[in-house]
Amino acid sequence: MALSLRPARATDVALILTFIRGLAEYEKLLPEVEATEDKLRATLFPPDGRPAAECMLAFWDDAPAGFAIFFTNYSTFLAQPGLYLEDLFVQPGFRGRGIGKALLLHLARLANQRGCGRMEWTVLDWNQPAIEFYESIGAQRKREWQICRLSGPTLARYA
C-alpha cells in the first residue's frame, strides 16, 4: 500500500468539503458546518491568488484518505510567522496507517522550510486518542491558554 500527499487543487473542492463534514461529524459539530463548495473555492482558490488557507490531501493507493487545512499566523514574541493547523482528519477506514502522522510531520517540515517559529493547533478536551497522538510526537498542550471567539451575530454587531 502506498501513501501519497499533495497540495489540493480547485478541482478538489468537493472532496475537501466531504472531509470537513466527516471531521465535523466526528467532533459532533455537523450542524455548525456552513462551508459550501463555492465558499471553499472562493477562500482556498481565489481569483486574486491569495488564499486564506492551504490544504494538503492524503491518498492511500489513490483513494482519498485524509486532509489538513492550515494557514500562516504570526508571533510577535518570536517576530516570526507560524503555521496554524486548522483541521486534520483521516477517514475512519484509513485510520491506524500513519496517515495523520504523515500529514502532521509534512506540515512540520513545511513550517521549518518557511521559517516558522512554531506550529500550533487545538484539540477537543474529550478527544483522548488525538491528545495521546499529539503528545507522542512531542507536542505540548498549553492548558493555561483558552480560546476566545467572536462569530456570527456577535461579530457582525461590530461591523
Image: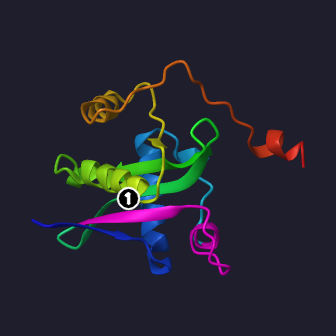
* Image x and y of residue 150, in percent: 75, 38
Residue 4: quadrant of the picture: bottom left
Which residue is most to the top? 144
Question: Which structural element holds mark 1?
Answer: strand
| Quarter occupied by the N terminus | bottom left
Residue on which disc 1 sits:
67
Q: Residue at x 60, y 68 (%)?
A: 51
Q: Give left or right: position of 47 versus 88.
A: right
Q: Give left or right: position of 91 versus 38.
A: left
Residue 30 visible? The answer is yes
* Image x and y of residue 46, in percent: 63, 76
Is residue 14 covered in magenta? no
State whether residue 106 is above or below residue 82.
Answer: below
Is residue 57 covered in magenta? yes
* Image x and y of residue 86, in percent: 50, 48
Which residue is most to the left? 1
* Image x and y of residue 14, in percent: 47, 71
Q: Residue at x 82, y 39 (%)?
A: 154
Magenta residues (range): 38-59
Label 1, residues with CA under 10 Å away: few <14, some 14-19, many ≥20 = many
Task: Say how many tags the image has.
Answer: 1
Q: Residue at x 26, y 48 (%)?
A: 101
Q: Give left or right: position of 153 versus 117.
A: right
Q: Give left or right: position of 38 versus 83.
A: right
Residue 90 visible? The answer is no
State whether residue 63 is above or below residue 69.
Answer: below
Q: Amino acid at mark 1?
A: Phe
Q: Nearer the viewer, residue 144 or 12?
A: 144
Q: Residue at x 24, y 54 (%)?
A: 99
